[in-house]
Image: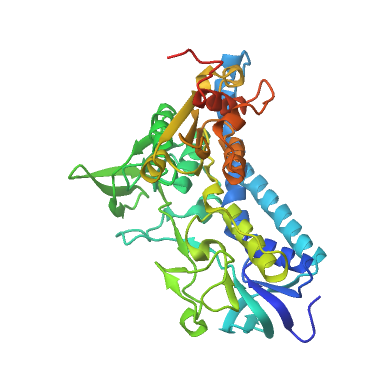
Amino acid sequence: MTRDDGRYDLLVLGGGPGGYPAAIRAAQLGADVALVEKRWLGGTCLNEGCIPTKAYVRAAKMMEDCRDAAEHGVQVSGAELDLAATTERKDGVVDRLKKGVRQLLEGNGVDIYDGLGVVEDAHHVTVRDADGEETQLETAKLLLAVGSEKLDPPIDGIDLPGVIGSREILNLRELPEHLIIMGGNVIGLEFASIFNAFGAEVTLLGRNPRLLKYLDDEISRRIRPVLRKKGINVITDAPVTGIEGDDAGEKRVKYERRGREQEAVGDLVLNAVGRKPSIDQLPLDELGVKTDSDAIVVNEEMVTSNPDVLAIGDATGGMMLAHVATAEGVVAADCLFGEPHHINPRALPDVAFTIPEAASVGYHEDEARATFDRVDVAKFSMTALGKAVAIGETDGLVKIVFDANSQKVLGMHILGSEAPNLIQEGVLAIDSGMTVEELAWCVHAHPTLSEAVMEAAHVGIGAPIHMLPR
């Protein structure tokens, strides 16, 4: 059901993890809201990113558990991956959640327009549906939640058959024998973990010297040997210079390392070098919306240089993460129609669903030492944690960075099982201004992996319980 006059208080362009929560929140606050989505509700995250990859991670972990079962006294034989069935299950998960998003929008009174939204000016958008029919909409405020798109580097052969992106790899029905992944950050490492566990040979080529360069340096250094131990061929500081193919379907990926050209040979290449804001189709100059580094510039209330135009999520650059987009969407709606509030930029978690997982929030150690007068670091290894030993998940650590003067927690960095869940303790500690002592004396249930956070905090105050004194 849509408004007959086509007039709204807010029009949200884009139904991804930033756009649809913004629309729902604005409607809850009493605004008349329209949401325009050209392809699919839920955006990249729900349809070909966060959610489908987690369905694959679940299958990957099950394969790893089968291989490790004998260590726990469980005999498993004949475990095989049916990738077609895994993909079908993933599709079912995505379809179910997409329907849920539509129901949430409709249930909150948001008018949904399926089609391409063409921005005429800050107050007028034309929606062109699949049949070519057009609908004219008018709005007091325009929220741009247009997301991001795959970045294709200027490499010869990047458009060859068999060189694919995350969309295509999530729709495979057969497992590649040797997968070559270009990209050493979250997307590349997640798929490396998944397909290694599935049973493919995996070579990962990272352009930068570090893996997961957005996380703390120590997490980056420690995850490399863990991945290699699993059999992933990790090669960093290796920019790709070209890709060649032959009639048999073999791909030769050329890269430079230590001044020499080398190559990796496989039957499938995944381009996972990153993403860029999807703003080329927007008339930003005509709207009077400023950009910087090909991203939309906004203030802390998500307002652009045009006071009637807001922008959130990947389109604004920064941390291209679904939960950041969601938070920004809610902030934008609240600042427009409710009680204004702002995001603490230091309390935004960054996570990688690798195997094992990794997560960071707040200041990295090197950032903190460059910013504050005195900085201390406390660490606790998963190898000393009862629950981690019991379940056989001992790779990793918890690291807390804190101000030695005020004792306030500045950052938390975790490598290990359930890191994306455990990092929430760091988010809360930083957002509420907790000290490392206050964190240490929070009672944690036993036996749990979360005790590693408490133990690290105890190290920080010089009172370790499950760690020998130095």
Does 299 sit above or below residue 251? below
Does 26 sit above or below residue 204? below
Please provide percent x and percent y for residue 238: 28, 45
The front one of 139 and 470 is 470
Name the quarter where the C terminus is drawn. top left
Q: How many marks?
A: 0
The front one of 450 and 269 is 450
Please provide percent x and percent y for residue 152: 39, 61
Residue found farthest to the front: 405
Please provide percent x and percent y for residue 353: 54, 40
Asked if residue 260 lies left or right of residue 395, the reply is: left
Look at 51% across and 19% down and name the residue there: 383
Please provide percent x and percent y for residue 130: 65, 76
Does 19 sit above or below residue 400? below
Quarter holding residue 217 = top left
Does 358 sit above or below residue 308? above
Asked if residue 64 lies left or right of residue 266, the reply is: right
Quarter holding residue 47 = bottom right
The front one of 101 and 64 is 101
Any part of residue 80 in sight: no
Asked if residue 111 lies left or right of residue 38, the reply is: right
Name the quarter where the N terminus is drawn. bottom right
Quarter holding residue 441 = top right
Any part of residue 402 in sight: yes
| Colour approach in the figure | rainbow
The front one of 312 and 54 is 312
